[in-house]
Image (spheres, rainbow, N blue to C red):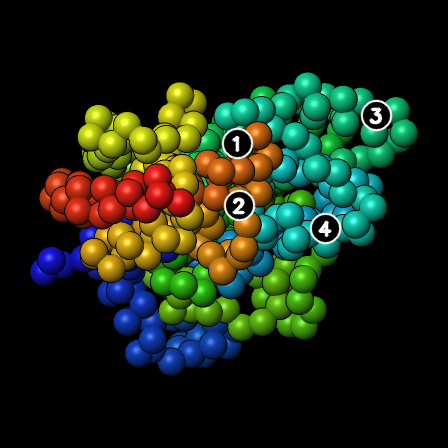
């Protein structure tokens, strides 16, 4: 093949031309955003313009945007027991998280281990709201304020969670709720007011920005978590350290591009995914499409080839020129089945063979045609090996 086909946008998206332009301009400029001279003010202006664009992507207020080094840090900043609102303490006693959260939430929070509860999901990977209700009621009776973290869309399956309904129930009990929208932002419409959450995490490189920038966006700019890093007063005292102005400028450019194209891209990219899914299911009935019958991201498909380890499938496709992923890119070196699929009750034989395809802004019609050509060359051999095993 002359060109590779990249279907791993959920791991990282190719950088957008607009982001490259903004990144280059900021890299060749001089000035610390905290300085008051002309160069410093120019850098500050780039950051503040990016803040406006990032806020607009999630329907938020620019004053509520805290820039971080990525989605993982944004999650860590959000998931602390120590909060204030307008200077008044607002401590959270317990953290409730779903069983299918990204590792950045499962392991990146700042609560003591005995103050964390994992909530179950159903067979489609959606939070069981009855379990949430039971936990909220128990903690309300004990006089506890809860912080809930529920991802908007799963990175492995694309399944969209009932965040708005969860937020309504959490707030009715006086709690706070955060959503990790790293996979959702730029792929479906994300609106802070509509979701009703207190904070949302997003990441630049998932939407075509440069690595090294993320954001935690608060619905109420006066809601303030204990910072992860102490030091200077950057980001209104919420995140110390000189801002990564080039990556932030690229983040803003990518956010604007993703927002302006969103409605059309949802339809276009969803069509690409559906065409590939339909063809694969028709030609290779042995392939199992996981969670195909639930609301999910338009760009994500999760398949399994029972009997063929996911790593074997991914390597075989890679050697043939097609980039896909086995589970989360952040944990691709792990041994064992996905914790997401395990929480859904997927049999281990199937879970161990699951792999993910994810489209994005750079995907084209010919990518589907070329990907199908790769599958036609690779899958029969994998099937023979699986049957012989």
| First reached walking from the N terminus: tag 1 or tag 3 | 3
The furthest residue to the right: 142
| On screen, residue 115 above or below 286 | below
Residue 310 vs 343, above or below: the answer is below
> Along the polypeptide, which appears first: circle 2 or circle 3?
3
- Find numbered disc 1 in the image and state the secondary structure of the residue it sits on: loop
| C-alpha gap between disc 1 and disc 4 | 32 Å
Measuring from the top left, give residue 362's x and y in whole percent.
22, 49
Residue at x-position 52% and y-position 31%: 346
From the top left corner, tell me how far across and down residue 272 is, in percent.
21, 35
Q: Earlier in the sequence, mark 4 or mark 3?
A: 4
Tags 1 and 2 in contact by the CB under 8 Å rule?
Answer: yes
Which SS class for mark 2?
loop
Please tell me which of labels 4 and 2 falls first in the chain. 4
Residue matched to label 4: 80
Task: Give the label, 4 or 2, closer to the camera.
Answer: 2
Residue 138's tag is 3
Mark 4: give few (<14), some (14-19) or many (20+) Cα within 10 Å. Answer: many
**For mark 1, what is the residue?**
346
In space, the residues marked 4 and 2 are separated at their CA atoms by: 29 Å
216 horizontally vs 389: left or right: right
Quarter of the image for the C terminus: give it: top left
First in sequence: mark 1 vs mark 4: 4
* Circle 4/circle 3 CB separation < 8 Å: no
For the point 36% across and 62% down, which residue is it?
Answer: 210
Distance from label 1 to label 3 (Cα)? Answer: 29 Å
User: Image point 21% across, 26% down: which residue?
Assistant: 282
Q: Nearer the viewer, mark 1 or mark 4?
A: 1
- Do the CB atoms of the residues marked 1 and 3 lie less than 8 Å apart? no
Quarter of the rendering containing residue 208: bottom left
Q: Nearer the viewer, mark 2 or mark 3?
A: 2
SS at badge 3: helix
């Amino acid at each position: 093949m002359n060109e590779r086909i990249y279907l791993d946008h959920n791991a990282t998206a190719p950088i957008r031309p607009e982001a490259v332009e903004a990144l280059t301009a900021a890299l060749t400029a001089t000035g610390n955003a905290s300085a008051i001279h002309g160069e410093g003010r120019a850098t500050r202006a780039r950051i503040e313009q990016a803040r406006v664009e990032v806020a607009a992507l999630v329907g938020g207020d620019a004053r509520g945007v805290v820039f971080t080094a990525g989605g993982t840090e944004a999650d860590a900043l959000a998931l602390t027991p120590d909060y204030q609102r307008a200077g008044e303490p607002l401590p959270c006693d317990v953290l409730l998280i779903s069983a299918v959260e990204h590792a950045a939430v499962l392991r990146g929070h700042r609560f003591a281990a005995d103050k964390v509860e994992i909530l179950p999901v159903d067979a489609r990977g959606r939070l069981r709201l009855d379990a949430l209700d039971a936990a909220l009621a128990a903690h309300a009776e004990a006089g506890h304020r809860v912080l809930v973290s529920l991802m908007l869309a799963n990175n492995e399956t694309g399944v969209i969670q009932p965040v708005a309904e969860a937020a309504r129930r959490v707030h009715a009990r006086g709690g706070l709720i955060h959503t990790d929208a790293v996979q959702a932002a730029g792929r479906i419409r994300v609106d802070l007011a509509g979701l009703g959450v207190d904070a949302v995490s997003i990441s630049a490189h998932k939407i075509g920005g440069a690595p090294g920038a993320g954001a935690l966006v608060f619905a109420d700019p006066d809601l303030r978590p204990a910072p992860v890093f102490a030091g200077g007063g950057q980001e209104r005292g919420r995140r110390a350290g000189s801002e990564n102005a080039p990556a932030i400028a690229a983040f803003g450019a990518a956010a604007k591009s993703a927002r302006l194209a969103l409605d059309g891209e949802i339809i276009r990219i969803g069509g690409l995914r559906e065409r590939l899914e339909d063809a694969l299911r028709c030609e290779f009935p042995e392939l199992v499409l996981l969670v195909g019958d639930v609301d999910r991201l338009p760009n994500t498909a999760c398949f399994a080839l029972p009997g063929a380890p996911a790593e074997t499938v991914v390597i075989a496709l890679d050697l043939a020129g097609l980039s896909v992923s086995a589970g989360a890119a952040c944990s691709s070196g792990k041994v064992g089945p996905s914790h997401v699929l395990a929480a859904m009750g997927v049999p281990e034989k199937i879970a161990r063979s699951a792999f993910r395809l994810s489209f994005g802004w750079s995907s084209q019609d010919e990518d589907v045609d070329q990907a199908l050509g790769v599958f036609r060359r690779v899958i029969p051999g994998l099937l023979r090996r699986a049957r012989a095993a």
